Structure formats: structure tokens, C-alpha cells
Amino acid sequence: QIKGFAFDLDGVVTDTARFHSQAWHALADQVGTPWTEELAQQLKGISRMDSLEMILAAGHHQDDYTQTEKEALAEQKNVAYQDLIKTLTPADILPGMADFIKSLQAAGYRLAVASASKNAPFILEQLKLRDYFDFIVDPSLLAHGKPDPEIFERAAQGIDLPVSAVLALEDSVAGIQAINAAGEISLGIGDGLDQAQLCFPDTQAVTLAAIKAALS
Ligand code: B16
Ligand code: MG
């Protein structure tokens, strides 16, 4: 019996990946790592420091910088990213997601956000969705990022539910693996998420009725 939902943010509620990519692309150019669409895909759902390490490793530059220099590079990317997400408005909520979130709240489900992004509270404010969520996981308190289950376990705890009563939505492979490892019901949005228990082609297709039908 599902009593709560845990939402990934980027790729599920809004498309911030284009802004992450824009900011990381500039940084990749600066450190001399060739930017590819494949690399951009691999960064989805991955924490800021782990993303930086992947970009440096892709160009064999991981040993060229001290830890302090790496932190400065990550901060530089974040400043550029934060400048881009200031432009977000409710019009940037992915198709169908505002109605879906509102319908869940109206039906009495508890809602959590399980995003690896430290910018999640700001993004939710920009989208005017902050008040619909009972709990936002603070990723700075996590020992491990996705695909570790910790973030989805924390989301269930934050809304006072056992993991078995939570359905979680994700658009990344690492995210689906994290949900499955946590023991929650996994709902994948988009292609290439064969490990998800429920698969939907896009956000528009995700409704409470469709989920109930898929689970029955
Ligand atoms: P920040 P999600 C993730 O968001 C993004 O997919 C990933 O590309 C990003 O590096 C990560 O958040 C950290 O974001 O730099 O803002 O803390 O998909 O988990 O909602
Ligand atoms: Mg995502």
C-alpha cells in the first residue's frame, strides 16, 4: 500500500540538466576534457564533486589538481549554474508534473524530494512547488550518493514511512538502482531504465490512475 512518494528533481520535476551541462561544458573546456553527450548523460544524478571527478578523469586530468583546487573548480561551476537557474519559473515544470504533484497532495499522500542537488530548495521555490513537499533530503548530510540507497532511505524516514510504502520517481540509472536497493517501488521516466519496476515514456504519462493501473 503506497502512502508516500519520493521525487528526484532534475529530469523528473524540471529539466535542470541543460543548465548543469552548460556549466560543466564550460569547465570541461577550461580543464581540457573533450565534452561529449555521453559524458553529459553519465553526470545525471551524480553529486557535484563526483561529477567534477568524472570530468577530470575523462580527460586524464584527475591528478593535475589538489583537493583545494578541485573544490574551487566545483564552486566555480556552481556559481555559473546558479546564475542560470535564476531564470526558472513555474513554466519550466515538466509537462503534467504540476497537476500530478497537486493531485497527490489532494489525495493525502506524503511527498518528499530525494535530489542530489544542494540547490533543490531554491529550484522548488522558483517553480512555486516548495509548499507541496513535506520533506526535502539535505544531500550534504549523506555519506554516499546515488546509486547508494541512502538518499531514498532518508526520504522515507523524513515522511515517517517504511520504505515499502514509498514509490520513488527517477530519470537516471544511478537513481533507479538507489531506489531498488532501498526497497521502494521504482518508477523510471524515459528510455534505458529497464531496471525500474514501472516505466513511463515521459512525465506527461505519469498520473495516479496510470500508476494504480500498472501496479494492479
Ligand atoms: P548540485 P537530481 C542532480 O540532481 C543532477 O542530476 C546532477 O547532474 C547534479 O550534479 C546533482 O544533482 C548535484 O547538483 O550541484 O546543484 O548540488 O537528478 O538528483 O535531482
Ligand atoms: Mg534526475
Image (cartoon, rainbow, N blue to C red):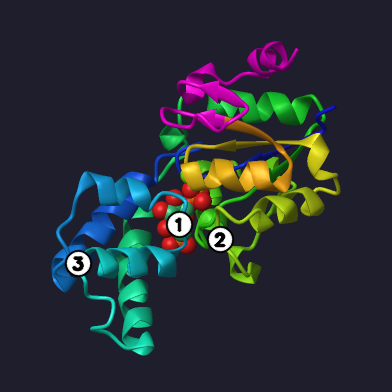
Q: Which mark is residue 145?
A: 2
Which residue is depicted at the point 57% across and 44% down?
177
What amino acid is found at the position of numbered circle 3 in the picture? Gly
**Does the CB distance between marks 2 and 3 fall below 8 Å?**
no
Image spot of residue 68 (x, y percent): 37, 88
Q: Secondary structure at mark 1?
A: loop
* Closer to viewer: mark 2 or mark 3: 3
Q: Secondary structure at mark 2?
A: loop
Which residue is depicted at the point 53% across and 57% down?
116
Q: Earlier in the sequence, mark 2 or mark 1?
A: 1
Residue 193 among magenta residues? yes
Q: Secondary structure at mark 3?
A: loop
Is residue 126 something one can see in this rendering? no
What amino acid is found at the position of numbered circle 1 in the picture? Ile
Is 29 positioned to the left or the right of 155 in the image? left
* Closer to viewer: mark 1 or mark 3: 3
Q: Earlier in the sequence, mark 1 or mark 3?
A: 1
Image spot of residue 32 (x, y percent): 13, 69
Circle 1 sits on which residue? 46
Q: Earlier in the sequence, mark 2 or mark 3?
A: 3
Is residue 179 something one can see in this rendering? yes
Which residue is depicted at the point 59% across and 69% down?
140
Q: Does residue 21 sit above or below 5 in this rendering? A: below
Query: What is the magenta range?
Result: 188-216
Circle 3 sits on which residue? 59
Beta carbon at label 1 within 8 Å of ligand 1: yes
**Does the CB distance between marks 1 and 3 fall below 8 Å?**
no
What amino acid is found at the position of numbered circle 2 in the picture? Gly
Q: Around disc 1, counting alpha carbons within 10 Å, would you say few (fewer than 14), some (14 to 19), or many (20 or more)?
A: many
Q: Around disc 3, counting alpha carbons within 10 Å, would you say few (fewer than 14), some (14 to 19), or many (20 or more)?
A: some
**Does the CB distance between marks 2 and 1 fall below 8 Å?**
yes
